[in-house]
Structures are given as C-alpha cells and as structure tokens.
Amino acid sequence: MQDPVAVLPSELVVLIFRKLALQEIVQCMSVCKMWCQFLDGCAVLWCTIDMRNGMYRGQSAKGSGCDKLATLLGDSANGTSRRRRRGSLLLSSEVQENNDDVRIITDADIDAIARRAGPALSRLSLDFAPHLSDDGMYALIHNNCINIRHLDLQANQTITTHALEALVMSLRNRLEFLSLRSTEIDDAFVQMLLISTPHLVHLDVSFCRKITKSAFPLVDQMSNIVFTPPADVVALARIIAEQGDTAYSRVLFAADAGSDELLVTRKIDDRTCLPRLKCILAAGCGCVGSTAATRIIKVFGKSLEILDVTQSPVAIDVFQHITMCVDWDCADGIEPLKLQTLKLSNMDSNVDIDTMQRAVVPESSAGPEHLWSFQDFALVAPNLTSISLGGKDSCITDGMVVRIAMHYRHLLSLDVHGSTRLSHSGLAALGENCTQLEHVDISECSGCDDRGVVALVGGCTGLKSLNMGGLHISDAGLSAIGDCLRGLEVLLLDSCLFVTSQGIRSMVSKFCESGCRQTLRRLSFSECYGVAVDDAAWCREQLRPNTHVTGNSALSFE
C-alpha cells in the first residue's frame, strides 16, 4: 500500500490531518520520517496550543496514550527520550521505563512551539506556567508569532512586565482574549493594555496583587497616560512607526543625551477609541473595589457583559454608583447597560440597602427627579441573568433578595452564600418570581431552614445546581428536593447537621424514580453527622457509575 502522504496532494493531506486532535497529530509524527517531516513543517496544524496545567509527561514503552498534547513532549519508544529536529515539541528529557516523567513546561518548550507554529499560532493557553521567564515571551516575538488572538498565561511570578509589554505590543491589533491571572502585572501595564489593544474583548487580571483601582482610569484620564517601555519595546515601536500604523496610537521618539526615549500616547476623544471589552475579571485583587467597578462600568458599560470583582472590598452603595454611570439627561431616554453577569462579594456588612444614604436620580425621560432605589438599578441594568453577592458575613438580607426577585424574574444564577441575615422569606420570593433559576448557592445562610428550601425548589423546578452546605435543614427539605427537581446535576449538602441516613436514601430513591438519576453528576453530604458512613457506597450503587458521591468517612466520627 502506498503512503498517502506521498501520493495525495499536500492540500488534501492537510485537510485530513486537521480533522485530528492535536495530540493525535503528535502521535502521527512517530509513524515514519516522512510523516514527521511533513507534520513538523505544516504550521497550520499547530495554530492552537492548549497545555492545561502547563505540564507534560514522557511516555515510556509500556505507557498508555496521552490525554493532552503536552503529555507527548519527551516521548520515546524505548523509554529514553530522543531529540527531534528544530522546532519539534518532542523535547529531550529522561524518561524512566514503566513510569511517566512529569515536567512543568519551560522556556525551551515555548521556543519549540514558537519555531514550529510561527505566524500560524493563534491560541496559546498555559494556565499553570510557574517556570516560564522572559525568554519564553521573547521566543514568541522572535519567531514571529504575531497573530495570537487568545493568550492564556497564569500562575507566574517570574515574567516581568517588560517582557509582557513587548509581547502585547507585537500582538496589539490582533489580541482578543488575554488572561494573566496570578502574575506580577501592575496598574501601568493594564493602562498600556487598554490603550494599545483595540480589539480586546476578554481581560482577566484576577489575583494580581499589584492591581489597584488606578489600573482602570476614566476616559479623560487616559489621554494623559505616558508609557515609557524598555529598549526591546522601543525596537518594536520603531517597526510600528515605520509601518505607518497610527490608527490607534502615536509613537514619538526624542533623542536625549544619546539615548532614545519612547513616549506612547493615545488621543482619547471618546469611548470609540477603546477596546469594546465584554468581560473583565478582577477577582481577588485586594485593592480593586467599588471605585474600580464604577469606573469600569462608566468606561466600558456599552459593551461589557461580565464583571467579576469578587473577593475584593466592595460597598453596597456600588449599586448606586453603577446607576449613576449612565446619562440620565439624554433626551432619547437612558441607554441601558448590556451587563449580564455581575459578581461582587465581601460587601460592607454594617450597611443595609434599606438604610444606606440615598442618591438623587436626576429628572429624565424615565421619570422626574427622585431618591435612588433598587428599581433604578434594575432600569439601568435590565439584562442581568447571573448575580453573585455572597461572601463571609454578607450584608444581603431578605429585603435585598426580594428586590432582586421582583426585578429580575429572568434570573438564571444567584449566589448569596454566607448571608446570615437571609431567611425563608427571601427564598420564598425567589421560588415565586424567579422560576427560571438554574444555579443557586445559599450555603452558610444560617437563617434558612426547611420552609425556605421547600418554597425555593417548589417554584424553581429547573434547578441544575444547588449548594446548601451548612444550612439548618432536615429530611423534610431533602424530601422536597427529591419530589420537585427533575434535572438536578449538582447537589451539595455538606455540614447539614440535621439530615439523616433515612433522608439521604429517600431522596436518592426519588431521584431514581423521577429521572434525576440520569442528570446527577455530583452529590456531596460530608460532615453530616446524622448520615452513616456506608450511605455514600449505597448511593453510588443506586446512581450512575460516573456520578461523584462524597459522604462521611470513618475519620469524621472520631
């Protein structure tokens, strides 16, 4: 039989291999030398590199296959790795027979990826890359990887902002998705990013400890931003200037004492010059709070759909500030925000929405001048389908939840965990008004009991995920869950001290009768001291094999 790679036209061979997963393409490289050379030189097949956890395993002669592309780095047939030609992902590493050698991705691996993919690389995901340094970023630049639209680089404390600035400058007009969670970027970098990437739609700077509210200036403040990057970025900017690219930035050079100083400025006349960000994630940034959230809404409110500032200090009056971000004086009426997901937490527990100082809403087509109310916020942000307000000692009360239920009847997801002042009245309002709810987290809401749970599940029969950890519920609440929910996927009952073995078994039996057995993926009731140790095993026998069940262990009772 003739070799199809040698006989068929190269265009047809590429179309065939593009049907394969990337890890399968890497496996095909070990078929023969011709296949290896063809696949290694076909950049279009390497446009997407997704290395989850930033790790790879060397595969021994007796090893099984891999579950991701990175597991084939260092593969060898005889248990000892071999070095492939330039640009290969199969790098040299010692692999012990009968054992997988796990390594975290390094700069050399990034260089190999960049050499093979070149300009064809459009997506690079490295969600755990603690060993990468500036050399890896410069390797992407030097190998002309200038068409990356999706860049995911997380959990790294060694890459400097200078290297990231150089990379962003090379990708500025193409970058659409950027995730830099748990990195060492600062406010100046975020400011540079906002004025240099006109097509950016997703920005994730969660758990970046140097990020503060200054990272998100107002429009009139952005025109005063002066960016002074290092020499390598100067070189890139020279190329940009030579290409005549002045649509979004002006690059000015001034000779001073024999050295070049680069000043990158941006003329910001209105919001149309800024990226139309749809998603901003800034969770866990301790210095990002209400002020930053308000600025983000004010600048990007016309396009923003998702805002996450959880685990950051936010005052409950942020709802007032967001309300005042829109133009209430517009003759044609206010233009509502496109916001669909709002995630806040750790709000000031000493202030309640009923007693906080009220702002004056100016007269507009929406109505005369009046004191602010939650109805005004609902008028400004009518498209919210996911709201997260939970946190330790959350200030959320029944009154707040009732307002949410009344104004957001189309709500799909609600997280109010840790709201100790929430009771069955709030849950009853959700069950009565928000019948489309799919995901609810009311864990650690110590004021909620069986009455609230019965009302909630009785009205929201389409729930897919329900977290009730730490609630003071009994078997009556579990019975209602078993009777009402038909498509439940995740149910968490950890630390519910008043549920018993009888309640758990009765609920699971109802799941099997109602069809919920086919949808349930996870059931957890650990640290429920009224539940026996063997109840978890019994539930596993009743439910599908792939359902993850967590119960009490013998150590829980010691």
Image: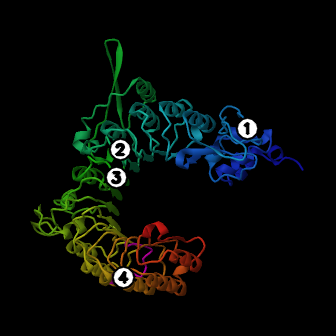
In this rendering, position of residue 95 left or right of residue 503: right
Q: Which residue is mark 4?
A: 474
- Residue 104 position by quadrant: top right
Callout 2 crowding tier (Cα within 10 Å): few <14, some 14–19, many ≥20: many
- Precedes in sequence: disc 1 or disc 3: 1
The residue that appears at 38% across and 77% down in the rendered structure is 436
Q: Which residue is mark 2?
A: 208
Q: x%, y% of residue 544?
A: 59, 76
Gap in Å between the C-alphas at discs 4 and 2? Answer: 42 Å
Callout 4 crowding tier (Cα within 10 Å): few <14, some 14–19, many ≥20: some
Gap in Å between the C-alphas at discs 2 and 3? Answer: 9 Å
Amino acid type, mark 2: Cys
Amino acid type, mark 4: Ser
- Precedes in sequence: disc 4 or disc 3: 3
Gap in Å between the C-alphas at discs 1 and 3? Answer: 44 Å
- Precedes in sequence: disc 4 or disc 2: 2
Magenta stretch bounds: 455-468
Q: Which residue is mark 1?
A: 80
Gap in Å between the C-alphas at discs 2 and 1? Answer: 40 Å
Q: Which residue is mark 3?
A: 283
Query: In front here: 29 or 428?
Result: 428
The residue that appears at 29% across and 68% down in the rendered structure is 382
Q: x%, y% of residue 446?
A: 28, 72
251 drawn magenta: no
